[in-house]
Amino acid sequence: MQAREIIKKMTLEEKAAFCSGQDFWNIRGIQEFQIPPTMVTDGPHGLRKQVNGADHLGLYESVKAICFPAGCALACSFDPQLSQAMGEELGKLAQAEEVSVVLGPAMNIKRSPLCGRNFEYYSEDPLLSSRMAAGTVRGIQSRNVGSSPKHFLANNQEYYRMSSNSVVDEQTLREIYLASFEGMVKEAKPWTVMCSYNRINGTYACENQKFLTDILRKEWGFDGYVMTDWGALDDPVESMEAGLDLGMPGPAPENAARIVEAVRDGRLAETVLDRAVERILGTVLRYLENREAGAGYDYMAGHEAARRIETESAVLLKNEDAVLPLRKEDRVLFIGEYVKRPRYQGGGSSHINPWKISSFWDEAGSWENVSWCQGYTDDPADEKAERYLTEAVELAKRADKVVIFAGLPEVWETEGVDRRKLDMPENQNALIAAVAAVKPDTVVVLHNGSAVAMPWIDSVKAVLELYLAGEAGGLAAADLLYGRANPSGRLAETFPLRLEDTPTYPYYGVEKEDVLYREGRLVGYRYYNTKKKDVLFPFGYGLSYTTFAYGHLKLDRAEMTDADTLTVTVDVTNTGAVEGKEVVQLYVENASCHEVRPLRELREFDKVCLKPGETKTVRFELGKRAFAEWNPRTQDWYVPEGVYKIQIGANAAEILLEQPVGVRNAVPPRPDFTVNTPIGEILAHPVGKAVLEQAMGEAMRMFAGVASSNQEEPGIMSDAMATATMTSMPLRALLSFSPEVKLSQLEQLVGAVNQAIMGN
């Protein structure tokens, strides 16, 4: 039976109740029509199915599942096909566990490295975030299980996340925060979307018609249901009017009663309620009709998939004197708790009960020439801390090389709490410095969910960033350290030198009511590049055990309109001795920009595998959006005319090749001149200049005469000052300098200018 036929037979009370969960994890069933309750459960990098106790903070144990690398690691692969492969594994596991929707991926922008949930999020860049999320969504849904990308929208801190008000200008929302979701929704078509707790410019996300209906549905074509984050619902009637469908968790009898009352007294049309029920029920039926009853899951295959994903995602940040890869004959001392008990995931609602944890020591502990010592502990009360440090320094002196597994304790990175600093624990920093002082050939392997400061970076030879590598991260670490796999990850976020250098300093984590996004579009590398600030490691940075060279950057045209597609090709060659993968990054810079905007922005990327000596030609196509910015006045995407640089970068800070292209508008932008428009803006347009000078020449000359008369008193107004003043002066100001001019004349004039431009 179709959803609409079922809805016709449901009572008003049944329909209202259906828009809240049956319990913590289940959508209501409809017994009369043999529709069972269907489960939704947390992702985004595993399956957190709880059976004997329910919560959204990871307090109760869940069933065994594969813990894949967290979003912070996965995004560094720069490989949407890899995220799709992970999604497929999640979908298969969900089918086996009878889960209808996986709550993920998590794809909020990393506005600050201090966000406590950054380990779940992909990137500071919306294009990378959107592409990686689209891959995950496609993968999950290829198994006929829904995904619920989250948290929509502008949820970028944990501090007072349930009530804070994200105050963001429209241009920033469109180009950064909405853009992270836009491509994913259009390309991957998720079954559901989860809205966030916070308010956006004064309105709760669950009640925000602009985002839930006008943009998400009407502009982007989303046709699934929107659910709340757990406990985010404010007013069920206003939310339903705005485009929300499902409030979680349930049951929520009072919310249902308020919906029923609103329908009966005419405040809510029953057709709006029917629409919400149809969206939810249609998705439930879609899952039930494709349910793989009795499906099993190959956990060992999932474990190996987690290992492969991490080897593709880890980032080699430093490798001085080619100290890596290690050789089996090297006498290597491994130091740290994480060698044997890895830090592999963050805390909170994404906390997975892993099927099997494989540490580095599980893989390498029996090998010849390897040894281990504690070095440090995450327990600040451990009385043996000084002894651990002393022992590590003494043993390091006798080793050929030392590898320290370090990072952030889980309690420092968890849902609900933001970090307070960039630094790793002091005892770990002290250990690294002390060991490097006696053994220059020291390697640091990092386990963390977000950027960290590295005061010891100049003292160590190599740094391998694993991020939170999932349950098989120890195996991946062995593969990478000993050269069985070649690192190919690139940073999906900037590592700043200091917290004080970040774009949100010093107000991040301080504002709990109105959270002002003062930095606007200058987020992450957009800020550091534009402000010309040095960083520890830039966005897109990463090394390999081989080397790559670029050449023959070609554009298929030197001039184009914003209606054209620009084809870009570039050759990439593996100039080293081993096979490796390179992430080709294409940035666009507006070379003739006269406004505050990011210096350059990532507009395309591709990951290619090359054998030694092999060359491949990588091809990109750039359309209007690669050059466009959002114009709040016209409520549309607009390409400022001028010269743009097409750049191939090793990362966001290091441009290797570039070519210019001139871009003009195929259709002149819709004019919106008014009497309050500065005269200079009208004169800057050739049509506006001709009309204005013909009609108002005398008035403008009169103003110039007033300025000229002031030359008798030096210092009052120079010619340059007069010109600048008139350029910035609104057209209506001519009323003050020319009594003959009437306001009605000016209004007719700008109307004529606008009409002439449209007809030109």
Image (cartoon, rainbow, N blue to C red):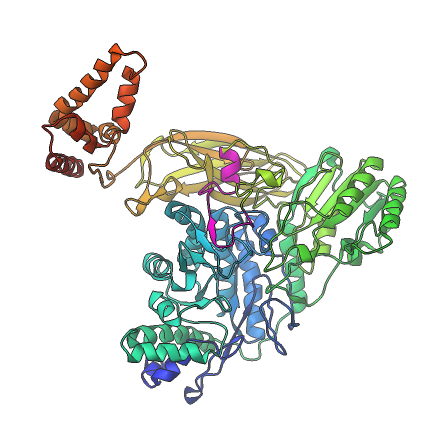
| Up/down of 57 relative to 656, above or below | below
Quadrant where the image shows the N terminus = bottom left
Residue at 22% of width from left, 28% of height from top? 683
The one of 568 and 701 positioned closer to us in this rendering: 701
| Up/down of 611 relative to 296, above or below | above
Residue at 48% of width from left, 70% of height from top? 144
Residue 9: which quarter of the image? bottom left
The one of 383 and 754 positioned closer to us in this rendering: 383
Q: Is residue 659 left or right of residue 407?
A: left
Q: Is residue 400 left or right of residue 743?
A: right
Is residue 578 visible in this depiction of the protein? Answer: no
Residue 576: which quarter of the image? top right
Residue 179, image x, y percentages: 42, 50
Magenta region? 508-530
Residue 207, image x, y percentages: 38, 64
| Up/down of 249 relative to 695, above or below | below
Q: Is residue 515 magenta?
A: yes
Q: Residue furthest left?
A: 740
